[in-house]
Amino acid sequence: MARHPSLRLRPRRSVLYLPASNARALAKAPTLPVDAVVLDLEDAVAPEHKAAARESACEGVRSVDFGHREVAVRVNAPGTPWHADDVAALAAVGPDAVVVPKVGSADDVRGVVASLEAAGAPDRTAVWAMVETPAGVLHAEAVATAHERLTALVVGTNDLAHELGARPAPGRASLLTAVSLVLLAARAAGVVALDGVFNDVHDLEGLAAEARQGRDLGFDGKTVIHPGQVEVVNAVFTPDEAELEDARGVIAAFAAARAEGRAVATYRGRLVEQLHADDAARTLALAEAVRPRS
């Protein structure tokens, strides 16, 4: 399956949901140090404001200069009264991605792609699937490989906890199995994996801890619900100077070993193979990619 061009290395440390019906939030977005914004037509918008929010989102995609920030729009779920109109309107303006909630199968993805393409969506517009139901988790691999336009899996932890009857607690023990299955599916398919939101906008220490957990599991970034959460999440997902020094050392040690005809090296007492050098190169590439914006 051909890879969508948006799968090139692009920072997605922080992905901020913004209600598309909030003009002030839309105007503020280009001033925030966020890597991507999701203009929301779903949870953040009351039914009576759905049509107006759709128009606002389309106007934002057309006319707002978001700079380096990736711009996605979350549509209402398939099967809702607003979904078809959302998809058709966005196909006409071509955001970077269309975020689809409540994806439970590969057919859901293919249905959205077919609607986008029938409405003339440009090739650059990707699809991000939100995995937030038990069915979505169990079918995550099929979802991730359903179509080349699918470039990201986004964990919807709030809906997932609701569907599971899970009780929220620090450490997310009740969700880790499901979260890890989504991450595994994304990695098997070679697509981006984005962690779910942290609900307490005042608890920045709790946010940082959960972001570190997601980073250590292997997520590319974390979705956030408030501008005040962006810098915390960026800091967690940005390699610090110690990590960069270590990455440079790993690459140098492995290069020296290869120059001597050896397939492995030792750096600071650790075995270094090609995969470790690749990981180190990815760390340096991410740091370089985010340097102008951090």
Image (spheres, rainbow, N blue to C red):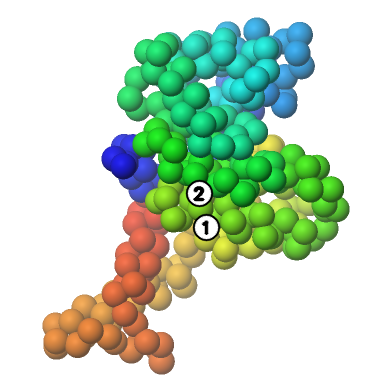
> Helix or strand or loop: what does disc 1 sit on?
helix
Residue at left 69%, top 45%?
Answer: 134
Q: Position of residue 50 (x, y in %)?
A: 68, 12
Residue at left 69%, top 37%?
Answer: 226
The numbered mark at residue 141 is 2
Query: Is 35 situated above or below 59?
Result: below
Residue at left 33%, top 25%?
Answer: 123
Residue 180 visible (yes or no): yes
Q: Please state which of residues 108 and 74 is positioned toward the viewer in this rendering.
A: 108
Q: Position of residue 213 (x, y in %)?
A: 64, 62
Picture quarter with the N terminus = top left
- Number of numbered callouts drawn: 2
Q: Position of residue 198 (x, y in %)?
A: 72, 47
> Helix or strand or loop: what does disc 2 sit on?
helix
Residue at left 35%, top 27%?
Answer: 124
Q: Please state which of residues 13 and 132 is positioned toward the viewer in this rendering.
A: 132
Name the residue beneath numbered marker 1. Answer: 184
Mark 2 and 1 residues: CB-CB less than 8 Å, in contact?
yes
User: Mark 2 or mark 1: which comes first in sequence?
Assistant: 2
In the image as oriented, which residue stretches furthest toward the bottom? 269
